[in-house]
Amino acid sequence: MAISVKVMRRPEAGRTSYMRATLKGMSLTFKHLLRVKKVTLEYPEDQPDLHPRWRGTHRMEVHADGRPKCVACGLCPTVCPANCIRLVGGEDDQGNRYPIVYEIDEFRCIFCGMCQEVCPVEAIHVGQHFENAEYTRDRFVYDLDRLMEQDHPTTLLWDPSDPRSE
Amino acid sequence: MADSSRRADTVTLTIDGHEVNVPKGTSLLHAAETLGIEVPHYCYHPGLSAPAQCRICLVEVEGAPKLQPSCVTMAQDGQVVHTESPSAKRMRQGVLEFYLVNHPLDCPICDMSGECKLQDYVFDEGREQGRAREPKRVFGRDDFGGDVLYYGDRCVMCTRCVRFMDEVAQDARLTVVERGDRAVIDTFFESGLDDASFAGNIVDICPVGALVSKDFLHKARAWDLDHTPSICPNCSQGCNIDLHARDNLVQRLKPRENQEVNGHWMCDYGRANYEWINRAGRIESPGVGRGAKRRAADWQTALGSLLDRLRVSEGAGVRIVGSPFASNEALGTLHRLSRAVGTVTESVFRCRRAEDEDPLPGFPLLVRQRDLAPNVDGAGILGFERAGSDDATGGLGAAASHDGILFVLGDQLDDQPGDFGADASLYVYLGTFDSPAARNADFVLPVTTFTEEDGTFVNAQGRVQRFEQGLQAPGSARPVWLVLGALLAALEGGNPPGSAADAFAALASEYAAFAGLSHDAIGTTGAVLEPAHA
């Protein structure tokens, strides 16, 4: 089949008015001029609302007596796809298993939240937090004390009223 | 059936629709195993008697009124067995639910997690949700002495540990006290398992996390460990073991089954002595020059100048100080090189010896030997003689003042004076750690330990056994057979060995004891040498 070319009929030059299209465009412009909706956030005076499932830097939950909730079971370094958690387990003076070393390299972390999901004792959490600036790179390896000091809200990985997404 | 009636020593039966022919007297559990069907079991262990008390290996046998315990029911001709029938599965699910009534489910803090049979079976076949609402009984933990801790809450009362101490160690120190859900394993008297020399095995055979090792407590997770088949280096019995390593460090030693050597067991002495393998501060690069003139060099430079020295000193008298911790490949290649460059006037090794042997009464083949090194017999075959006293000191007087070529391999010379080898025309020290007595060495060459190379040992039974590389060598340390094999090839022509198997093949062609053997022929269970040589 031969290729056919469709010839469009266009108005001749000088015989076209763009007035209608211009008015249509300008009406949209003036509509937005009158209907003021503020999108600029005066950060840092104003803080953004983070989504409940926002996954930011980590936080370790603590018991009432100040011990970390972590029992050094080793599931988070096992599940971590970025291999950013270093854990050395041991026994404290009360005979409890606890992490002697617990470090998260926040640079390597991809904030997938699987550490929080896998934790059997709800100790490690990703947090609703994004202000992580530091002066040196080594400050991005959070040790256990640092993780326990964090006080930002933790992430909800699922809807508490519908935990199985049913 | 006609086939099996002709051969009366075997029976043919059907398990899960597969026909199998097994020797008479085989249990159903074993017969299923030959088909690759695993019947869950706790109390049954191939090295122990079977009391059939855990009730989880019950299978359906057609014609039998009830489910039969497969660990003690012997296979019979024409039997039809179902391990996966609805009644067998329902029974297993019920038994598992009973086991979990009082089990604390503390898998996150349990050292057995990841290799636990209760975890495996419940994961495979257990109920999704428990139905027990009553509070669980709590025992806490009990120190059994020795290296063993007992967590009564996790125990499934299989009594493997009690039977091991009774039947194999023949030193009944454990028993079941109380009954019903109050039943626990306990020790007699205060001594517990202290100074029991094979008690570590009860940790291995415990199917759950009730018995754990104090040494391994909270140290690593089972799934993080790399397993490498190896040979226990702590005596000349040469128990087959698995090295369990993490982060390039040995975390524990576990016995590997070999019915000709150690059965399922190993001694506590061998099990506990592994930290020396992890010792830091190794020699990491070759050093050339004596005393203050010692300079670090790369292998090419070091071996090049060593080769020049060996070429000009051909025909000199050679003395060798070897080590019973070195592999056959290492000792044999060193001996061959020494003969190539001169006349070997003395080749010795020193070995620490225990006061007496320590046999395992229930498995007489397994003895903790007097020689506390793995390759004493191999060194003997390769022309090395024992020197020094039973604590591995002394006996090197002639070597210390030798004026020809002196090779030291693997012996750290801790008791030797600083002027050791000062008169030697050429002193080569192949070792893992630097030593004051290596000060006069012209060449200090870093070599690997048995965990960092492939190779073979000859045990006290005259059995050649292979071990495999489990760790990465530090720095530029290389296996002895690789270093000396390259020198030998440069001196005598031919190709340097590319692997430990090549190095062993060279020994097999030279030493009658190893004739006809190869790494492939030795395999995973070892090969016995002719008694005349061993």
Image: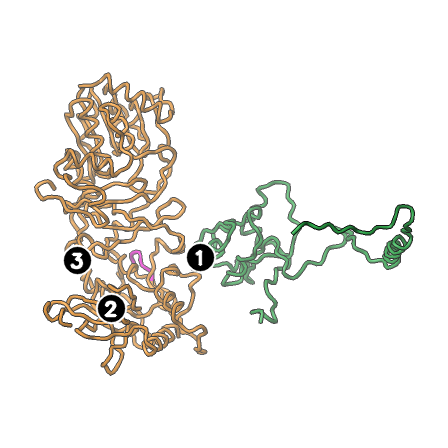
Residue B471 position in % (x across, y down): 35, 43
- From the image, tell me which residue sits under label 3: B363
- The answer to whether residue B193 shows anywhere in this view is yes
Q: Which amino acid does label 2 sit on?
A: Leu
Q: Which amino acid does label 3 sit on?
A: Phe
Tell me where residue B163 sits by quadrant: bottom left
The magenta stretch spans which residues? B145-149
How crowded is the residue under tag 3: few (<14 C-alpha within 10 Å), some, or many (20+)?
some
User: For the residue labelled by badge 1, is the local secondary structure a helix, a strand or a loop?
Assistant: loop
Query: Residue at the spot x=31%, y=27% of the render?
Result: B444
Looking at this view, is B293 or B51 the one in front? B51
Looking at this view, is B126 or B80 the one in front? B80
Q: What residue type is labelled 1?
A: Asp
Q: Is residue A48 above or below residue B184?
A: above
Please say if the residues under marks 3 and 1 sit with CB atoms less than 8 Å apart.
no
Chain where mark 2 sits: B
